[in-house]
Amino acid sequence: MAQIDQHGNGPAKGISDRAAIAIVAVLLLSLGGGIAWLLTWKPGLSACEDAIKETLKAPATYQRVKVEGSSPLYTITYDAENSFGVPLRGSGFCNVNGAQASWFEDYHPDAGHSDD
């Protein structure tokens, strides 16, 4: 039987236990995602990616494939399209100095080229 307080009001109207549990679960999952992001955060990586995109013909097609290393020196592999829309894979080194980043693209000579 519902209890009535001294003012004649019935039980407090609030959220159900299930709703409260669902809210707590969502908050914990959100926090867990934030913690995971924080653990994988690499200082200066966005500056490196900006430096890479400045060298691309189609910067909007940039997709990071792999990052190795830690600040201030990263090795980055990426995919992006050339001016003909052909997807290419590139890689190189990035040196971070504060908010500035310097990008050095790897040189991959043509495997079929010969000076003989």
Image (cartoon, helix red, strand yellow):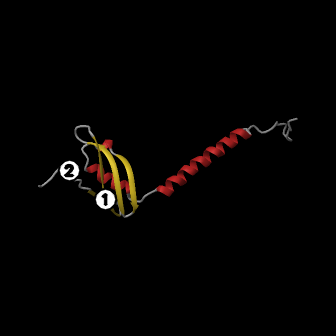
| Residue that carries the numbered disc 1 in the rendered image | 93
Front in this rendered view, residue 34 or 83: 83
Q: What numbered label is drawn on residue 110? A: 2
97 over 18 or under it: above or below:
below
Residue 50 position, x and y percent, is 32, 52
Residue drawn at 25 percent across, 50 percent down: 55
| Disc nearest the viewer among 2 and 1 | 2
The secondary structure type at the circle numbered 2 is loop
Q: Amino acid at mark 1?
A: Phe
**Residue farthest along the front direction in this orientation:** 116
Counting residues from the start of the chain, the first of labels 2 and 1 encountered is 1
Occupied quadrant, residue 61: top left
The answer to which of 47 and 76 lies nearer the viewer is: 76
Disc 1 crowd rating (10 Å Cα; few below 14, some 14-19, many 20+) is many
The residue positioned farthest toward the right in the image shown: 1
Q: Quadrant of the C terminus?
A: bottom left
